[in-house]
Image (tube, rainbow, N blue to C red):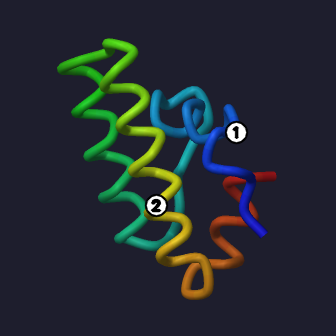
Amino acid sequence: MLPAANHSVWTQIATGKRSMQSEKLAINLFAKTNAMSFARDSSPANVQQLAAKTYAFFQQYEKLFASEFAKILA
């Protein structure tokens, strides 16, 4: 079960404070896209948007990447 959408973990992942490294290409591509967006615009509004996108990504692929997500969220 994923933490709530407003949990601080999503901001930590979106800003790179919590690593999202994985053996799964889709996860790494998503993390790289977040990192590039954050590097271009680190405003609170963009961070909030990235955190929401990160939560949505985890929610959408929760069953497919369950073991990978568990490692990231641990």
Q: Nearer the viewer, residue 50 or 21?
A: 50
Residue 36: which quarter of the image? top left
Q: Quadrant of residue 63?
A: bottom right
Residue furthest left as drawn: 40
Q: Position of residue 24 (x, y in %)?
A: 46, 73
Quote the CA–CA distance across marks 2 and 1.
13 Å
Q: Taking 4 as reference, is 13 above or below it?
A: above
Crowd around label 1: few <14 · some 14–19 · many ≥20 (10 Å): few
Residue 44, x across and y down, in percent: 39, 15
Q: Earlier in the sequence, mark 2 or mark 1?
A: 1
Checking the image for residue 7, the label placed there is: 1
Are there few (<14), some (14-19), or many (20+) residues within 10 Å of tag 2? some
Query: Mark 2: which secondary structure?
Result: helix
Question: Can you say whether 10 is above or below 25 in the image?
Answer: above
Residue type at tag 2: Ala
Q: Which mark is residue 16?
A: none
Instruction: Name the outermost residue toward the top.
Output: 43
In the rendered view, tell whether residue 41 sits above or below residue 74. Answer: above
Q: Are circles 2 and 1 on residues that touch, CB within 8 Å?
A: no
**Along the line of sight, the residue nearer the viewer: 53 or 30:** 53
Res. 69 image quadrant: bottom right
Q: Nearer the viewer, residue 12 or 2?
A: 2
Q: Position of residue 19 (x, y in %)?
A: 58, 41
Instruction: Name the amino acid, label 1.
Output: His
Please tell me which residue is depicted at 54% across the width and 49% down the height of the picture. 20
Q: Quadrant of the N terminus?
A: bottom right
Residue drawn at 74 percent across, 53 percent down: 3
Q: Residue at x 26, y 21 (%)?
A: 39
The local secondary structure at tag 1 comes to: loop
Is 7 displayed left or right of 38 in the figure?
right
Number of numbered discs overlaid on the protein picture = 2
- Mark number displayed over residue 56: 2
